[in-house]
């Protein structure tokens, strides 16, 4: 075969390949065709065996044509394969699902509303430097009453109907105030604690539960005044209800504080203009407070001339009722998921 | 305590008469919270005072009459049909419900024909106005009634008044009468107190009887006054004053009984001093004694009950004979009756503690004991005695014999309390000067001296036995100045807060919630049956709960010893609400007896209150569509591990089967072991337990004692591997009863350093594997930290482990 014929045959094969590729629709066929031309026994490879028989002078010319045809075949193969990959990717974009189907449930849990409220209250007081303190729920009469200036036979005991365990000495704490006593017995001032906890009273109706949660605060230091108490309470209710609310302290009697005060909060529903929740008064009662009575200091051996202090206590159920519109205290304790899952 | 607004105002001299709302606000601001206000006349409207000017029979009915009434002097008469038999003669006043009037039964009056005669409304009987049950006749006002014609019936009946409910603080015995509240009101509104009429000049009836008062112990009975009134006619109330007394008593919720009893009650509500009247003819001696009861002494109180007394009880005696339980209840024998004509009137002061003990011991809580328990001013006794005598003579026609016999061996001296102005300012946080303080205190009836500019010497009025210390006076000052004067500031922090360790309970709660469980909080107490529902053996501490001495109901009889019964009961409740798929947990205290019971000392060792975390799963897991797959014991295990790791970090927790936990299914229960100690259990709830608590279908639970867990420190970072690892799988055929944990143990025991971890891929059971056999497919991963392992190294390590498994389990390689 002459160099001329060889070149013509090579170029024909090139054209033949270019014609063969486009109709092929899958990768396997393209690779097979590619092998038919440039594989070990492919048509181009067969022709190249003729190359050795040509005169040396013709070889560079024919060699250049071989390279050119091979390059054409490789380029065309790559192009077509790329085209096919793109087509597959584009075809996948035609897929669709009903995105309005329900989400897959993650089984998200819920902290009890009272836990959430307690953690939040503790957080707010922590920012003011209060540290959490705790005490037992089964308490002694001394820590619960005597040391808080509520001796036996004191009419103030009528205010808190007590569950007793044995005799009159061991009981379920009726308030978190024994934590005050336990703290002051073991720690010298300055003291700044907040004591959340469960307490028990013999009382059961829509707004009273025989078990409920109080949060107690106590600050004892030099120069602590009634103004400090007011400031802490205003800060707390404003943070807790996430709006600027004021607090009204109203004279009241708790044996372990003097002066003593009922804590009224500006009604968070009507902002004080009067509504059903605050019975038209603009204020809602949230707890008791006052300056630590010198008699309490005497029981825990703190010098009442050097130190003064304030204490307050609030019911967390009530705070949660006010903030979340819970209308019966019972819901907190029945384990009803229809309630628990709302928060 | 209930008070009447008109009664209160009668005792106050104020420049400007406040409205009832202003009064209530002032009292509340001062610390006497007004808890409720009731308009006494709110039951009806449109009923007016009318005068009868003529009456004739109804032409069609014998029992009816046609009554002409006027509501204006000289005005035109209106004819009203009336069925009452007691229509009065012309000139007397009746109460006419006119057309448009509304009555307590909800009726609105319209013109209505009665047997052919149209009646514009009606003349009212007591029951029609909600004043009582009397329907025998219409109400006829007294001849001397001064209510103008046309005025509201409320005015004529004393119902144009408000009843206020005062929440009296437990330390304020002085506000248990209108006078004490009036003292507060005039202090708040800058007025003067008006004492009621106690003049007895018109009622002197002869020489004093031969009578002495003997107080055995002035500590418990500081003062006793006695007065004899003779010629009393005990009757139901009839005069205008008697009617007003009865009206007012009704207004404060007391049923009028007779003029005599009503007067003693009236004075108690007016002044706060309880009184007692004895029928003087029943007394046989000339000495009224006040002494403690002898042990076992008995005596019949006026409710007819024979009481056995103890030495602490204070008794009033006629000679040696008990005639009353001092301050609590009178005696049956000396009770005043309709026949009583001579009265011994007691007005005395007793120590609060003594009265409270007796009242509590006998369960006798009376208006009198309520007041004495809170402290009655001894200085009040003589005033109250004179006031009662004055009223009794006025309404009962009696005369006082001689003067009051007043035994007051050691009059309570006035206390003077030094009050330092710097202390006042420091405690209140208000920049008060001594003039302001002095003014406030004087408004309250204190006398105040000021020996130096920064010192006050304060003498509270005798009524204020609760004010004894400087701090009490400071509260009084602040009350009058107004708590609203206190500025607000936040206390300066003088010391860093102490370090507090992380709280196991909070860590467990957060982790369990994040793992998808819902937190419940249940009561700390429950019934004996619920505690027994777990079927615990008598040796288990938890089977002996701590009992309440005075539970409110059997459902709250004992303190819980486990969280599970309440949680399972909650599952049952949710099932009954159509919510069978639940995953609930609780973290809280359980209450366990200490060895020797609960009376041990020191008090810190009353009971153990460990914090437990428990959870229950019932029904199915959440699913996107349709029903989820049922929960199983491994969900409970997962939650338990989540809680443990939240507290203790990534520690090794072993599990092993247990048959000893009676509230779990014996074949589906595991104990969780940390460093050799059991910290809790998980498994399927025993069917008997489920049944006792009403749970339908399988339930799974875990139960952890958090106090047994060690708090983890901050987790430390482990190096991230730089070199790839390899895994090899091995399929084993082994006996079914060999637990998975045993396989893990064998792999760990080879201590092959290249092992980076292992996982169980399959646990396959099939009869074709052979009886009692199972197949397990384990995947073990290998890695070295400093280099990439060769296949040969990995193969060698793997074969060594497989060899140990085959030999030690034993197992066959498949």
Image (cartoon, coloured by chain):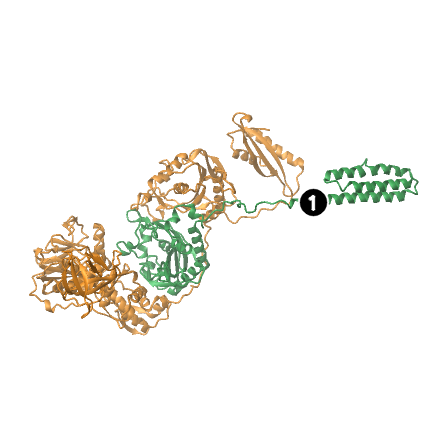
Chain colours: A green, B orange
Q: Horizontal and vertical percent for residue A191?
A: 41, 59
**Chain ID of residue with mark 1:** A
Res A2 seen here? yes
Q: In this view, does B123 lie to the left or right of A230?
A: left
Q: Quadrant of residue B87?
A: bottom left
Q: Horizontal and vertical percent for residue B307?
A: 16, 49
Relative height, residue B307 to residue B483 (above, below): above
Crowd tier of the residue under label 1, counting other residues whose Cα lies within 10 Å: few below 14, some 14–19, many 20 or above: few
Q: Name the residue under label 1.
A: A87
Figure quadrant of the N terminus of chain B: bottom left
- The residue lying toward the viewer, choosing from A300 and B797, is B797
Figure quadrant of the C terminus of chain B: top right
Q: Horizontal and vertical percent for residue A102?
A: 53, 45
- Tell me the SS state at disc 1: helix
Q: Quadrant of residue B53?
A: bottom left
Q: Horizontal and vertical percent for residue B160?
A: 24, 64
Q: Quadrant of residue A245?
A: bottom left
Relative height, residue A255 to residue A205 (above, below): below
Relative height, residue A132 to residue B183 (above, below): above
Tally of numbered discs = 1
Query: At 84% across and 45% down in the image, what residue appears?
Result: A68
Res B674 seen here? no
Q: Is residue B106 left or right of residue A311?
A: left
């Amino acid at each position: 075969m002459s160099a001329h014929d060889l070149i013509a045959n090579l170029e024909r094969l090139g054209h033949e390949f270019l014609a063969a590729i486009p109709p092929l629709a899958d990768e396997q066929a393209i690779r097979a065709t590619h092998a038919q031309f440039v594989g070990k026994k492919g048509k181009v490879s067969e022709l190249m065996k003729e190359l050795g028989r040509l005169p040396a002078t013709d070889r560079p010319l024919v060699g250049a044509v071989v390279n050119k045809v091979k390059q054409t075949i490789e380029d065309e193969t790559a192009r077509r394969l790329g085209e096919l990959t793109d087509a597959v990717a584009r075809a996948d974009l035609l897929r669709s699902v009903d995105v309005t189907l329900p989400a897959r449930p993650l089984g998200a849990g819920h902290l009890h509303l009272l836990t959430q409220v307690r953690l939040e209250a503790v957080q707010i007081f922590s920012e003011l430097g209060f540290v959490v303190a705790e005490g037992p729920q089964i308490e002694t009469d001394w820590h619960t009453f005597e040391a808080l200036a509520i001796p036996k036979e004191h009419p103030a005991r009528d205010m808190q109907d007590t569950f007793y365990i044995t005799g009159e000495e061991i009981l379920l704490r009726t308030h978190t105030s024994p934590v005050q006593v336990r703290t002051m017995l073991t720690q010298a001032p300055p003291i700044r604690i907040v004591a959340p906890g469960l307490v028990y009273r013999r009382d059961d109706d829509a707004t009273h539960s025989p078990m409920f949660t109080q949060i107690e605060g106590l600050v004892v230091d030099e120069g602590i005044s009634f103004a400090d108490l007011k400031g802490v309470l205003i800060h707390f209710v404003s943070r807790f209800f996430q709006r600027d609310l004021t607090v009204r302290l109203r004279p009241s009697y708790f044996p372990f504080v003097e002066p003593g005060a009922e804590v009224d909060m500006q009604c968070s529903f009507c902002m004080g203009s009067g509504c059903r929740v605050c019975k038209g008064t603009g204020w809602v009662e949230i707890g008791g407070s006052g300056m630590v009575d010198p008699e309490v200091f005497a029981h825990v051996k703190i010098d009442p001339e050097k130190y003064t202090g304030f204490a307050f206590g609030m019911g967390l159920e009530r705070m949660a009722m006010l903030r979340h519109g819970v209308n019966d205290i019972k819901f907190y304790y029945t384990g009803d998921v229809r309630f628990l899952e709302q928060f | 305590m209930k008070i009447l607004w008109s009664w209160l105002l009668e005792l106050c001299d104020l420049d400007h008469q406040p409205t009832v709302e202003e009064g209530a606000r002032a009292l509340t601001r001062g610390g006497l919270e007004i808890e409720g206000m009731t308009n006494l006349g709110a039951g009806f409207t449109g009923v007016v005072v009318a005068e009868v000017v003529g009456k004739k029979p109804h032409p069609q009915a014998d029992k009816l009459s046609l009554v002409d009434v006027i509501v204006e002097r000289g005005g035109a008469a209106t004819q009203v049909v009336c069925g009452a038999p007691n229509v009065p003669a012309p000139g007397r006043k009746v109460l006419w419900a006119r057309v448009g009037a509304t009555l307590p039964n909800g009726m609105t009056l319209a013109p209505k024909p009665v047997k052919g005669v149209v009646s514009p409304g009606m003349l009212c009987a007591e029951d029609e106005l909600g004043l009582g049950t009397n329907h025998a006749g219409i109400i006829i006002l007294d001849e001397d009634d001064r209510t103008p014609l046309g005025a509201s019936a409320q005015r004529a009946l004393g119902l144009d008044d408000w009843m206020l409910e005062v929440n009296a603080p437990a330390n304020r015995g002085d506000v248990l009468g209108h006078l004490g509240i009036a003292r507060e009101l005039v202090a708040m509104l800058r007025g003067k107190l008006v004492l009621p009429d106690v003049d007895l000049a018109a009622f002197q009836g002869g020489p004093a009887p031969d009578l002495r008062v003997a107080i055995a112990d002035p500590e418990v009975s500081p003062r006793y006054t006695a007065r004899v009134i003779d010629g009393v006619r005990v009757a139901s109330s009839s005069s205008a004053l008697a009617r007003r007394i009865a009206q007012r008593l009704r207004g404060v919720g007391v049923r009028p009984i007779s003029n005599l009893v009503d007067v003693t009650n009236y004075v108690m509500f007016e002044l706060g001093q309880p009184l007692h009247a004895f029928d003087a003819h029943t007394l046989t001696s000339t000495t009224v004694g006040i002494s403690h009861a002898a042990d076992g002494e008995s005596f019949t109180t006026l409710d007819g009950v024979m009481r056995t007394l103890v030495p602490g009880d204070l008794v009033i005696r006629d000679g040696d004979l008990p005639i009353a339980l001092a301050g609590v209840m009178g005696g049956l024998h000396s009770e005043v009756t309709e026949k009583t004509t001579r009265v011994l009137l007691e007005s005395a002061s007793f120590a609060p503690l003594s009265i409270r003990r007796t009242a509590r011991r006998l369960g006798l809580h009376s208006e009198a004991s309520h007041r004495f328990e809170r402290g009655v001013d001894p200085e009040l006794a003589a005033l109250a005695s004179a006031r009662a005598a004055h009223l009794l003579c006025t309404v009962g026609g009696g005369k006082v014999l001689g003067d009051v016999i007043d035994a007051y061996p050691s009059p309570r001296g006035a206390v003077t309390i030094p009050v330092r102005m710097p202390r006042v300012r420091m405690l209140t946080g208000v920049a008060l000067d001594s003039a302001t303080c002095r003014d406030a205190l004087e408004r309250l009836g204190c006398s105040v001296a000021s020996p130096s500019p920064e010192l006050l010497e304060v003498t509270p009025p005798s009524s204020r036995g609760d004010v004894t210390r400087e701090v009490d006076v400071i509260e009084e000052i602040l009350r009058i100045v107004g708590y609203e004067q206190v500025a607000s500031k936040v206390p300066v922090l003088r010391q860093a807060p102490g370090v507090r360790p992380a709280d196991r309970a909070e860590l467990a709660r957060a982790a369990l919630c994040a793992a998808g469980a819902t937190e419940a909080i249940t009561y700390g107490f429950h019934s004996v049956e619920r505690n027994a529902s777990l079927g615990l053996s008598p040796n288990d501490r938890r089977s002996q709960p701590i009992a309440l001495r005075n539970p409110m109901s059997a459902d709250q009889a004992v303190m819980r010893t486990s969280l599970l019964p309440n949680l399972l009961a909650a599952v049952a409740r949710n099932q009954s609400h159509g919510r069978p798929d639940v995953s609930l947990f609780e973290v809280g205290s359980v209450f366990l007896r200490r060895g020797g019971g609960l009376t041990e000392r020191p008090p810190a060792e009353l009971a153990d209150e460990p914090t437990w975390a428990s959870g229950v799963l019932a029904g199915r897991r959440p699913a996107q569509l349709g029903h989820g797959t049922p929960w199983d014991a491994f969900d409970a295990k997962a939650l338990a591990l989540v809680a443990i790791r939240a507290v203790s970090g990534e520690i090794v927790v072993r599990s092993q089967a247990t048959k000893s936990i009676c509230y779990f299914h014996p074949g589906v229960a595991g104990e969780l072991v940390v460093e050799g100690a059991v910290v809790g259990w998980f498994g399927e709830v025993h069917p008997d337990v489920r049944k006792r608590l009403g749970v339908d279908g399988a339930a799974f639970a875990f139960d952890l004692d958090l106090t047994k867990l060690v708090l983890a420190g901050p987790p430390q970072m482990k190096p991230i591997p730089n070199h790839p690892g390899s895994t090899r799988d091995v399929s084993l055929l082994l006996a079914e009863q060999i637990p998975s944990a045993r396989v893990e143990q064998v792999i760990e025991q080879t201590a092959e350093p290249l092992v980076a971890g292992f996982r169980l891929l399959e646990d396959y059971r099939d009869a074709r594997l052979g009886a009692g056999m199972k197949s397990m497919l384990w995947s073990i991963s290998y890695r070295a930290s400093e280099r990439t392992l060769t296949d040969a190294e990995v193969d060698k390590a793997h074969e060594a482990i497989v060899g140990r498994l085959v030999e030690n389990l034993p197992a066959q390689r498949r």
